Amino acid sequence: MRINCIAVDDEPVALKLVTSYIEQTPFLHLMATYTNAIEALKAIHEQPDLQLLFLDIRMADLSGVELARIIEQTGRNKSLRVIFTTAYDQYALEGFKVDALDYLLKPFSFVDFTKSATKAFEYFKLLKNTSVNAGSIPAQQNIEKNYIYLKVDYQLVKIQITDILYIEGLKDYVKIFLKNQDKPLLTLISLKNLEERLAASGFIRIHRSFIVAKNAVTAVTKNTLQIGELTIPVTDQYKEAFSEFIKDWV
């Protein structure tokens, strides 16, 4: 499998370096290089088979982050991914918000580049396999997978569903609390989106900010449930579903 990519940077030296790295990577196919994001945007519209952008952030006229946002609006953000290349680490959060696949801080070595490129390879391999499976495996079997993939710290992380205790929503982010891990995983996804993905996997939404694993519940009252030492209130919006859960739980 080869990944179709372009490189975009308004610094000739930096563009030459990333181009040479791409050409040395067997699973990358360089389609073109551009010195500004507006030219790259035109290429994106004209080349539907384009998959990956190595994209500088600070550029005149249109920044890399702005271009990434445009890609999101086109609906191609799953099939067309971005790896940012920049000399400014303060843009890391902006890159996370637009769901960049990775973030290379200049000056980066070929080893660093290879790590990011490999993440892209694994992502598109997974995307391809998912598409194939979606057409050949019954829908119910897809639902019953015991894992999900989420973006955590610029990596695609495989999370066993049975390891999830509860999930806390924080605006556009969620914290995922897992068994045998002191620190939660932080990922950029809405709680509603995650609720839909876990709906058939033994989870219940009992608060606007919390989804809990039914098997992790250790105690309940009329208006609360407990997971270990944590007590979570049940809001009015979810009391009917909570009542059904209690019937099954006892």
Image (spheres, rainbow, N blue to C red):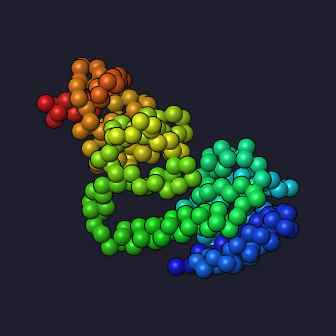
Please determine whether, in this image, residue 158 is positioned above or below residue 199: below
Q: Is residue 49 visible?
A: no
Identity of the residue drawn at 86% across and 55% down: 60
Please determine whether, in this image, residue 128 is positioned above or below residue 241: below
Q: Position of residue 229 (x, y in %)?
A: 32, 24
Q: Position of residue 38 (x, y in %)?
A: 80, 63
Please determine whether, in this image, residue 57 is positioned above or below residue 51: above
Quarter of the image with the C terminus in it: top left
Lateral position of residue 2 relative to residue 192, left or right? right
Lateral position of residue 45 relative to residue 209, left or right? right
Identity of the residue furthest to the left in this view: 250
Q: Position of residue 163 (x, y in %)?
A: 32, 45
Identity of the residue drawn at 74% across and 69% down: 18
Identity of the residue drawn at 52% across and 39% down: 173
Identity of the residue drawn at 28% across and 20% down: 223
Q: Position of residue 64 (x, y in %)?
A: 74, 56
Camera-side residue: 192 or 85?
85
Displayed quadrant of residue 101: bottom right
